[in-house]
Every structure is written in C-alpha cells, then in structure tokens.
Amino acid sequence: MEHLAAQAIDSGPVLTLDGLEIRPAELQVFAHGARVGFTVREFQTFFVLAQRCDRVVTRQELYGLVWGGDMPRRDRSVDVFVRKVRRKLELVSPSWTYIHTHFGIGYRFSPERSTN
C-alpha cells in the first residue's frame, strides 16, 4: 500500500461535495466558503477519508495511507489527527458533521447536517 506522502496528491482535480471544496494542489479545504486551516498531515488524513466517501476506513488502513507502514501497537496518531480535523471543520461549519466513528474499526467520511 503506497502512502500519501509518497504520492503526488496535487495531481487530482478540485473536489466539491456538500458545501466542501477540496483543492489537492493547494492542500486546502473550504467549508461553505470558509477556509479550513489544516496542516499538511491533517489535510492528508482528511483527504484519504474524503476520497473514500461513505466507506469505513480502518485505523490501520488510514495509518498506512497517511504515515506509511504498519501502525505500531497502541499508536493513537490516527485518532489524534481525526480529532484535530473534526475540530477544525466544526469551527468553520458547525451545522455539519463530516466524519463518523465506527468504534473498534475506524472512520467514515459522510457529510450530514447536524441535528443539534
């Protein structure tokens, strides 16, 4: 499995989905017109999930695609970065939920209007 740091993610087109504009060439995401200030690693984490919309991505798969290699036992990097991505998305788009947790498995990107 080739990880994202080893491939050129900037070769992809701009993606639009439910108010999100994802610009791989710029490592930028805009939510309903507002820029989400992701770091490179946060963008990579988000991009892997967004490319697999509505599909559960295991923590191990996400780690392999973003960090490369096998996830060390008890490593929480994936969870930490998903939490950071969620927090930043929530700041600019509080009425939407983008990333859903599948406990014991991983995460799924599926934009939904928040019910609260």
Image (cartoon, rainbow, N blue to C red):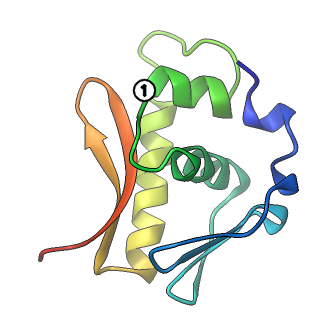
Please, is residue 19 above or below residue 63 in the view? below
| Within-10-Å neighbours for mark 1: few <14, some 14–19, many 20+ | some
Image location (x, y in percent) of residue 53: 46, 50
Quadrant location of the C terminus in the rendered image: bottom left
Whether residue 73 sits left or right of residue 22 in the image: it is left
Q: Which residue is mark 1?
A: 58
Q: Nearer the viewer, residue 16 or 31?
A: 16
| Outermost residue to the left | 116
Amino acid type assigned to the residue bearing label 1 in the image = Thr
Image location (x, y in percent) of residue 87: 40, 64
Quadrant location of the N terminus in the rendered image: top right
Image location (x, y in percent) of residue 5: 80, 36
Whether residue 63 sits left or right of residue 85 in the image: it is right
Q: Residue at x 51, y 33 (%)?
A: 77
Q: Nearer the viewer, residue 98 or 94?
A: 98
Image location (x, y in percent) of residue 99: 37, 54
